[in-house]
Image (cartoon, grey):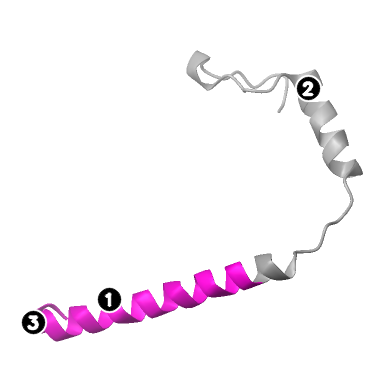
């Protein structure tokens, strides 16, 4: 954040500037961790369920509410 930028009192940053710099340094030091196979499966299943649910809702919409399309 620029020093000349002033935030309203209700928008004060949660993390102080020195702590934010330390947090950024720590995040940059972290090693890359690939996704575990179970995490990949959970992501895939979530996407599949979402697409199927969306398709079902579109079908319900066209079937039971045909005049609104």
- The x and y percentages for residue 59 are 25, 84
Q: Which residues are magenta?
A: 41-69
- Using the numbered discs, state the Cα–Cα distance from disc 2 to disc 1 in whole angstroms: 46 Å
Looking at marks 3 and 1 on the same chain, the residue that comes earlier in the sequence is marked by 1
> Can you identify the residue that label 1 sits on?
57
Q: Secondary structure at mark 3?
A: helix
Residue lying furthest front = 38
Disc on the earlier residue, 2 or 1: 2
Most extreme residue toward the top is 9
Q: Residue at x 81, y 19 (%)?
A: 18
Is the stretch drawn in magenta largely helix, strand or loop? helix
Give the camera-side residue of 54 and 3.
54
Q: According to the image, label 3 marks what residue?
A: 67
Asked whether, in this view, residue 7 is left or right of residue 38, the answer is left
Numbered mark located on residue 66 in the image: none
Q: Is residue 63 magenta?
A: yes
Any mark on residue 19, and which?
A: 2
Q: What is the secondary structure assignment of the residue under circle 1?
A: helix
Q: Is residue 30 above or below residue 41?
A: above
Q: Residue at x 72, y 26 (%)?
A: 2
Image quarter where the C terminus lies is bottom left
Task: Give the SS element for disc 2.
Answer: helix
- Residue 34, magenta (yes or no): no
**Viewer-nearest of discs 3 and 2:** 2
Between circles 3 and 1, the one closer to the viewer is: 1
Mark 1 closeness class: few <14, some 14–19, many ≥20 residues within 10 Å: few
């Amino acid at each position: 954040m620029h020093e000349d930028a002033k935030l309203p009192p209700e928008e004060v940053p949660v993390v102080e500037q020195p702590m934010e710099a330390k947090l950024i340094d720590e995040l940059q030091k972290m090693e890359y961790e690939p996704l575990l196979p179970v995490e990949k499966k959970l992501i895939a299943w979530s996407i599949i369920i979402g697409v199927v649910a969306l398709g079902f809702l579109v079908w319900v919409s066209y079937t039971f509410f045909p005049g609104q399309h």
